[in-house]
Image (spheres, rainbow, N blue to C red):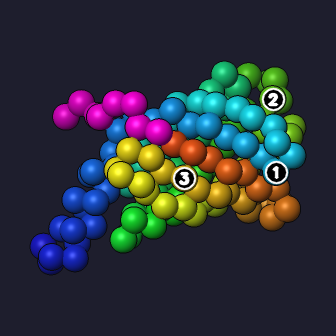
Amino acid sequence: MGQLKRAHQAGAAAVDGVYVAHFMSKSEQYGQGIVVVDGGRIHGGDLDHVYVGKYSLENGEFSASLDVSNHSGTFTSVLGPLPHYRLALNGKVKQQQDITCRGTVEERPGLTIQINLHKVSPLVR
């Protein structure tokens, strides 16, 4: 295994954990949920939505693609009444416990969101 690949995996392992997610839309709607970051994968949710996807990390730059689905039938998303959408995220990792990113709904580029993740627990291995 090359040094670059090992360094990338070590960086990803350092951010792996359970995070509290705080969301804010450009119309200043707020929400929060829980996100699990684990080896290139993201799983999470809140009272009305499930988020699943993949992420990459390079030199402290975080990017992800998430599929967000409404599971409750109650449309309380900070982005409005969307039953399903794909969210493209880009941001930065700070101190391996905070990730701040901006997201755009791929199908509707005018819909954006700010997401702040704060690590609350490491993963059990």
Q: Secondary structure at mark 1?
A: loop
Alpha-carbon distance for marks 3 and 1?
15 Å
Kind of residue sitting beneath label 1: Lys
Kind of residue sitting beneath label 3: Thr
- Tell which tag, 2 or 1, sits nearer the viewer: 1
Locate residue 69 relative to residue 45 in the image: left or right: right
- Reading the image, the residue beneath label 1 is 26
**Residue at point 62%, 37% (across, down):** 22
**Residue at point 22%, 76% (across, down):** 4
Q: Nearer the viewer, residue 106 or 24?
A: 24
Asked whether disc 3 touches disc 2, contact meaning CB atoms under 8 Å apart, the reply is no
Point out which mark residue 100 bears.
3
Kind of residue sitting beneath label 2: Thr
Q: Quadrant of the C terminus?
A: top left
Q: Secondary structure at mark 2?
A: loop
- Tell which tag, 3 or 2, sits nearer the viewer: 3
Mark 2 vs mark 1: which is more N-terminal? Answer: 1
- Reading the image, the residue beneath label 2 is 76
In the image, residue 57 sits, relative to residue 84, either above or below, namely below
Mark 3 vs mark 1: which is more N-terminal? Answer: 1
Q: Residue 20 location, x and y as percent?
A: 51, 33
Q: Is residue 10 magenta?
A: no
**Residue at point 73%, 43% (across, down):** 24
In the image, residue 11 sits, relative to residue 30, either above or below, namely below
Q: Quadrant of the N terminus?
A: bottom left
Q: Secondary structure at mark 3?
A: strand
Which quadrant of the structure image shows residue 122? Answer: top left
